[in-house]
Amino acid sequence: MKLNTQLPLATIFFKHWGIDDREVGIVVAKASFARSGKRWVAEDEPMLVLEDTFAGDPSCTPLVQEQDIAPGKRGTDLIVHATARSPEAALLTDWPVSLTVPDRLHYGFHVRGPSRWTKGRRGKWKQTTPELVSEVPLTYALAYGGSATDQNDKIATFENNPSGMGYATAHHLATCSELPAPQIGLLADLLGADPLAQMGVEGFGPISKSWLPRRANAGTFDETWKATRHPRMPKDYALSFWNAAPGPLQSEPPLVGNEVVLVEGISHEGPVQIKLPAVACAVQFDGDTSNMVLDTITLDLRSADPSDYRVDLIWRTIVAATEEYQSAEIVGFALED
């Protein structure tokens, strides 16, 4: 199917197997917006991301950008790239960070300065007071996770976040006198004095397909799958496998655009309030119109200057009878306040 549009969108059409194993067509449209004063302005040439991008080695560094090619998602992914910044640029040991979409979702955690678990003379571990800081990059490399040696001197990895810090085994603790503690986490976890107590993985960024718990949603790839279903997804696969946002930032039912996103703890000037672009997309073919689902929102709020903020929106829809249509037009419309 050939896609046409008069809008500043990047588009793609591809075929995939639906959840009922029938082949369907997937239409994807992407828009990128930059700030102009208090308004969002669409960029002329948005780029579709065709492969996952990592901070470094994919096996041990965070996912930076999830590919845009997916057959669908369960609800909307809300992904935020940001740096935590203390109120009024004060030097603090820690402060809260949170994200709220009123009446839809709320998620929060704490960030803090560098600290360490240290071993005392009697082998008892304690945690040092965090250093005073005014900024903490919101990256999973500073959240709980990582790897350590086990009793067989093999590498044991925390599969919910191989890129993180603070994960330990009893064997590893027996061979070292100090261990870096995570800088991002729930406050109760961060205050823990036991380096063997596992913590949650907190952050706003995308989760790699190879990390747990996301990987488990892919289903069972065994000999039965290879013999009876390859290259289709396993029978026990869940559509949520394609959701890259952390669980608390997956909105179901989907967001539609025009919502307010309130982020606290990322600006020295106070809470950041973002109103998403008030636009939506639909596909028209042979007189039929199909509204597209806004299933991915990526906010780039890393800059200290709000005029540098950016947002990418991705809409997606399924076309069941692809053989009936040779072309389609992607149109847009404004949402009412």
Image: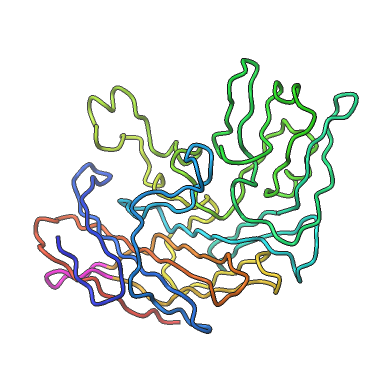
Give the quadrant of residue 28.
Answer: bottom left
Q: What stretch is highlighted in magenta?
A: 282-290
Residue at screen point 31% across, 35% down:
235
| Image coordinates for residue 285, horizontal then vertical, percent | 15, 69
In the picture, which quadrant includes the N terminus?
Answer: bottom left
Which residue is at the front of the view, 11 or 293? 11
Q: Where is residue 36 in the image (x, y as percent from the top left)?
A: 49, 82
Q: Which is nearer the eye, 172 or 278?
A: 172
Residue furthest top in the image:
152
Q: Is residue 29 above or below residue 185?
A: below
In the rendered image, the residue lying farthest to the right is: 121
Residue 229 lies, with reference to residue 41, above or below; the image says above
Compared across the picture, whether 287 is left or right of 201 comes to left
Q: Is residue 155 left or right of residue 115?
A: left
**Front position in the image: 4 or 332:** 4
Q: In the rendered view, does 235 fall on the left or right side of 138? A: left
Quadrant of the image occupied by residue 323: bottom left
Residue 162 horizontal/vertical position (percent)? 56, 37
Q: Which residue is found at the position 39% from the left and 60% from the top? A: 295
Residue appearing at x 67%, y 49% in the figure: 184
Q: In this view, does 202 lie to the left or right of 51?
A: right
- Residue at x 66% of width, y 71% of height: 271
Q: Within the magenta stretch, is there residue 198?
A: no
Secondary structure mainly formed by the magenta segment: strand
x, y percentage for residue 306? 58, 75
Q: Residue furthest front?
A: 56
Image position of 180 with respect to 333: above or below: above
